[in-house]
Image (cartoon, rainbow, N blue to C red):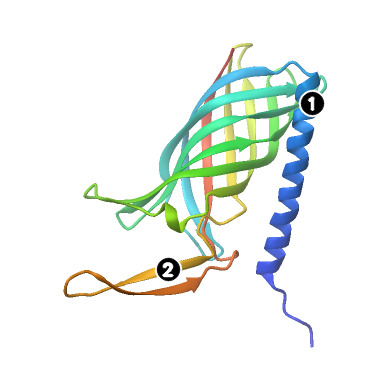
Amino acid sequence: MPQSIDHGRLHYAFVKQLKWLGLFLVIFGFAVASYAQPGFALKAAANASTVFTPDHIDHYLAGYNGGLVCDFPVSHKFFISSGIFYSAKGNYASAVFDRLCYFNLPLLAGYRMGNHLEILLGPEFGYLVSAKVKSSDNSSLDFIDECRRTELAFNGGLRYKINRKWAVDFSFVRGLTGFEKPEQTIYLLNPTNGMVQGTSSYHVSERENPKNQSLELGVLFFL
């Protein structure tokens, strides 16, 4: 009989290979940077983000991100684009929304299609600095202890250079690793006094672990 495919292990192996690819690109990027004169730009962007699993996707939530862009030329057509950004992501469901804030480091391969249009593709690494769930009555709860601090994502987009100083870009960022810790703990409360009377734990597979996804529209000012 044919054996069933373990999609969780396949996904883990795929992400592990992407991490090695990302490490290679980081080393390659620093090597290029040591020989090339980088160009810098300030970026401010609005985003619409959500979280997804294989069987479900939540409503999109408006957010923002901004930071410093660094472009390292490789040739007349090719370049490497990196930088550091602060990103506010999240999702919305049933009058409750999650807000996840990251420091992001993209490492993108860029290709100039002409004098104005550029294509960018590559990995993006994230470090979680805040995770809160908020309700419509403005109450909030911190749940960063239940989250992974690091994230690996795919980043792909287009940049249109208006002139030497200004550009606009559009990016699609899709998480490759889930943001929840694999081992989760549920606190059991006493319905009478609301005190914790016990705990229960469960395992979240990588396939079912919710992942971030966002659409971003930004403006760049080159220094």
Specify the quadrant of the image occupied by residue 196.
Answer: bottom left
> Is 109 situated left or right of 222 in this image?
right
Of the 4 image quadrants, the one containing the N terminus is bottom right
Task: Tell me which amino acid carries mark 2.
Answer: Thr
Q: Residue at point 61% right, 36% down?
A: 105
Q: Is residue 48 above or below residue 50?
A: above
Quick one: SS at disc 1?
A: helix
Q: Which residue is mark 2?
A: 185
* Res 117 → quadrant: top right
Query: What residue appears at the point 51 percent right and 59 percent down from the top-left corner?
Result: 210
Q: Residue at x 77, y 35 (%)?
A: 27
Q: Nearer the viewer, residue 165 or 31?
A: 31
Residue type marked 1: Val
Name the residue nearer the viewer: 174 or 14: 14
Q: Which residue is found at the position 76% from the left and 38% from the top?
A: 25
In this figure, which residue is indicated by the disc labeled 1? 32
Question: Horizontal placement of 20 versus 206: left or right?
Answer: right
- From this viewpoint, is residue 103 visible? yes
